[in-house]
Image (spheres, rainbow, N blue to C red):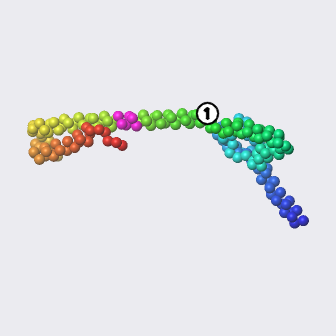
Amino acid sequence: MKLLHALTAALALALPVAAAAQWQWIDKDGRKVFSDQAPPSDIPAKNILKQPAARAAAAAAPAPADGAQAAAADAAKTAAAAPKAAASAPRLSGKDKELEEKKKQAEAAEAAKKKAEEERLAKARADNCERAKRAKASMDSGMRIATTNAKGERDFMTDAARAAESKRLGEIMAAECGPAPKL
């Protein structure tokens, strides 16, 4: 009698679990759907997240009575597996295509932005190189060069100041006139 009560209680507890949503899939709009019914036929197999194991196993394994029926059942299983395999192959939906297109556009925009930045840096380097070459030519010409001090007075460069400035301009030319540094 206790066994009967235990079995009844177990069945009573298992009944709500069996009635709960056993199918889960992602619909054509990308929303997750929970149901106790199988999804529509237009839902690809890759979008089916969960299905009832007991029903799928029972439907997939009918008990054959003899060898001919067993061969027919095997052929049916193979034929049923082929569409599932084809359906499980990734197919691009409209949203996937839009996402891929947006991704390509973002990559193209990033590449264009990077190219524009490289061109801007190359132009700035060329300008700096040209200025450094002209200033170095002036330093090396031997002409007297005057600068303006903080008080606004004119000061002529000494030979030591001229050599230091010539060295600094040479370093700028080495950095800016050579090949662009790798980033």
User: Residue type at mark 1?
Assistant: Gly
Q: Which residue is mark 1?
A: 94
Residue under the point 9% across and 37% down: 143
Spot the residue most to the right: 1
Quarter of the picture containing the C terminus is top left
Which of the 4 image quarters holds residue 97? top right
Seen in the image, is 92 located left or right of residue 64? Answer: left
Residue under the point 13% across and 43% down: 162
Quarter of the picture containing the N terminus is bottom right
- Camera-side residue of 82 and 144: 82
The image position of residue 147, as x and y in percent, is 14, 41
Spot the residue most to the front: 67
Residue 65 showing in the rendered view = yes
Crowding at dot 1, Cα within 10 Å, few <14 / some 14-19 / many 20+, comes out as few
The image position of residue 50, as x and y in percent, is 70, 46
- Camera-side residue of 85 and 25: 85
The image position of residue 19, as x and y in percent, is 79, 50
Q: Is residue 92 above or below residue 167?
A: above
Residue 77 lies in the magenta-colored region: no
Q: How many marks?
A: 1
Residue under the point 36% across and 36% down: 118
Residue under the point 67% across and 43% down: 32
Residue 152 showing in the rendered view = no
Q: Which residues are magenta?
A: 114-119
Magenta-colored segment: predominant secondary structure: helix
Spot the residue most to the bottom: 2
Which of the 4 image quarters holds residue 154? top left
